[in-house]
Amino acid sequence: MQAPPEQLGSFYLGAVYDVETGQRTEMPLNYDARDLVTHAICVGMTGSGKTGLCIGLLEEAAIDKVPALLIDPKGDITNLLLQFPDLRPEDFQPWINPDDANRKGKTVEEFAIATAELWRNGLADWGISGERMRLLAEHTEYTIFTPGSEMGVPLNIMGSLAAPQLDWETESEAIRERISGTVAALLGLAGVNVDPIRSREGILLANLFEHFWQQGKDLDLEMLITAITNPPVKKLGAFEVDVFYPAKDRFELALQFNALLASPKFQSWLQGEPLDVDRLLYTAEGKPRHSILYIAHLSDSERMFIVTLLLENMLTWMRKQSGTTSLRALLYFDEVFGYFPPTAEPPSKRPLLTLLKQARAFGLGIVLVTQNPVDIDYKGLTNAGTWFIGKLQAERDKERVLAGLKGALSEAGKSEPADYSTLITKLHNRVFLMHNVHEDGPIVFHTRWAMSYLRGPLTLPQVRMLMSERMHTTSQPKVTQRSASSVSAAPAASIVDEGMQRTSHQPQSAPPGFQTMPPAIPPDVTQVYLPCKLEERDAIRLVEQRAGGRIDVKNVQLLYEAGVLGAATVRFVDQKRDIDKQTEMALLARGGRQLTGLDWGRAELLSIPTSELSTRPASVEERQGPFYASLPEGAATARALSGAARDLADWLYYNARYEVTMHPELGIVRRPDEDERSFNIRLQQAARERRDAEVDKLRGRMQKEIERVAERLEREQQALTTEQARAQAKQTEQWVNIGESVLSFLMGRRAMRSFSSATSKWSQTQQASMRVEQRKQNIGRLQEEKQKLEEMLQAEIDAIIHRWEDVLDNLVTEAVKPRRTDVNVRAVMLAWAPLWRVVYEVDGREEATLVLAYVEPEN
């Protein structure tokens, strides 16, 4: 079949299925992404095609650049990373299950060829091109996190004990709910089987968390153990701590947590990326991310622990977002069995229920999946707006699902519009019934072919192999290195050999233009020394890099060159864009032997805080100096520095600018203290909201025209049916009349009268036929008009989607200049800038290189 046109915000899930004929139709099923804001549940037995449907849904979300956090208790969702756009057998081969190949009587190589051909034909059958598969790979980054293991990207769960960035005065209830969930998860992980709310263990831990978090202090397990043995709180309720929970018993609890902390296995829980929802949803550059939380290798208590912490963190992240009706992100739970039971209250249930009730207001969609429909709290799922129901194994499963579905219909204020029981009975593999509160009735559809290779659950070693190329870039934070400057050499990175040849330690004379003592400076001139941040060996390393190898160092000296250091505060104000940014600036103008007529445009912008400035030079060996650049007499005077201050103020007024990045059409301006990643995320969400709003407005306007034409078309079709019936009746009457006329003629009775009557009937029949033909023409014209309107609507929707698709490409940068009164030169002083002079021999000749010593070395 032909795939529908690519539309952001529209998920291509499959094709409408005719349950009567048992065949799929050519009508694609496009699911509005915003419908996921009201959440979804997917139920079906093993083999029903749940994984294929859900992988397809997640693929559509990835193409739409919707970030997602995916909880994967079985390992099925890791298949999302098995993307092979070129469909080559060698891409499939490492992931072929040898048992599957053996059952088919094939080698792994033969089975890989057959699988590649199967996927090629399956995708072609659904109209899915290689270009669409490339979009899937490019629009989103995929990462598999393995808490408690280093096979994938490890996850540091101790970050979850950090104080949430919420206001206690306004969010105290939410914070206490998070404390309750965290305490329950910790007790379960430590094997302490008590009521986390009413037990003294739970009460003590909850009070400890509240004590530290109210002060904004982060906790870790070691701090918690210490606090258990020596609580910072004196009372629990009306009783002293030692009365309510004696020290001996507290020590036993501390021992249980200490055993957990001391366990070598637990150390892997303390490594890797922090459990930070924002970082799990977006990369450091702001690119959407699908983060798979692989927990198939964990015990039941460990799974409950990590899931509860994740849900609690999700709640905290959600409450910091702004409200929206567009889909901001997805939380996908591949098997919710055991985490959301109807009667029990595991630690995971409360935060999950809270998310189901509140997340829609923040654009967070939740998708829950299960193959055990009996043990699910369907009362909590009345908030789910979409139900995907697949083939069910037992009658009681169907009855349980129908009961939950009726509850959802009742919650939505709708009656049951169809015989769901009969429809569910007729479902086959990969055929699902979709109930969507945003649609008029249920839809039965056949799922499309997944672009990802559905290999089945992956093991930890397979996860390691899959993530081997991604782990370094994903798990290691990116470090931006600042290059050390050199007067005549590029930055270097080689390591210095401590056994390198050095010169003798005899005192050395000053190089040309320098002297052993600093020049005499008037007492009213402030002079400072910039810190020496580059060590001698780092300077040699830089020179080695320039020389391309080892050098024979003859001498290393520390020189000081005079310059003028200006410290200023510049404020940039733009009330229209709500910009008010104050910048501290330190500029070093190195003028050589002259300190007047400085060109501030060539000055260096330093990042050295004033606290690091000194009134003394750095200490080095006598042979190394320091040596000072000589100055002409009278060059450094208070008058000269005063003039330099005026020049600096003028230069800053005319040249200092604050670059503001903005999107003119959206009116989104990057805030002064907002990093690029956060700005990009905010901008993409605003673009998604604008896109949805414009599409809604367009649909609302044009849908009225389409509906008017559709109503006229329906009237014409009804009229055609009536006219056709009349024409048929007239034609029958005509033939009867002709028969009567012939009979009358043969019998010699009233021939002329019969002929006249027959002629009249023939005329009426012709007129009826003409009216039928006119109705058909009207219908054809209205159908054409309706089709043109629908095509026009689609074209305009495509234009809107295209316009907002690459929103980051439409940014502009504008400069905000300071007002004269907003430039404040706080101080201008004589500054001595340190340089290393490295003298070395190469090819029998002696060379010298100067390297700036006040610049940080490379890491």
Image: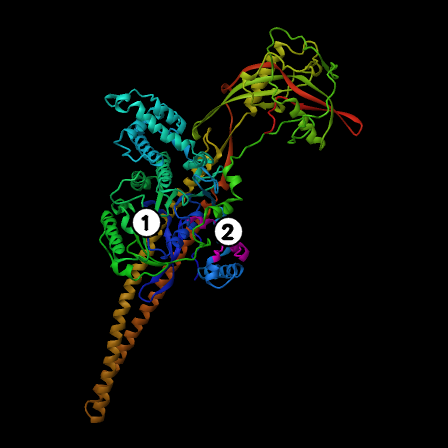
x 37%, y 52%: residue? 31
The image shows residue 346 at horizontal and vertical percentages of 29, 40
Looking at this rendering, what residue extends furthest in the bottom direction? 747
Q: Is residue 276 left or right of residue 738?
A: right
Residue 65's label in the rendered image is: none
Q: What residue type is disc 1 on?
A: Ile
Q: In which quadrant is the C terminus drawn?
A: top right
Q: Quadrant of residue 185?
A: top left
Magenta stretch contains residue 659? no
The image shows residue 332 at horizontal and vertical percentages of 37, 45
Q: Which residue is mark 1?
A: 41
Name the N-terminal-most of marks 2 and 1.
1
CA distance for labels 2 and 1: 29 Å
x 33%, y 48%: residue? 40
Q: Is residue 566 above or below residue 426?
A: above
Q: Is residue 521 left or right of residue 705?
A: right
Q: Which residue is mark 2?
A: 134
The image shows residue 830 at horizontal and vertical percentages of 62, 14
Name the one closer to the observer, 676 or 341: 341
The image shows residue 292 at horizontal and vertical percentages of 43, 44
Q: In which quadrant is the N terminus drawn?
A: bottom left
> For the residue labelled by badge 1, is the local secondary structure a helix, a strand or a loop?
strand
Category of crowding for the residue at label 1, using alpha-carbon neighbours closer than 10 angstroms: few (below 14), some (14–19), many (at least 20): many
Magenta-colored span: 77-98
Name the one closer to the observer, 372 or 423: 372
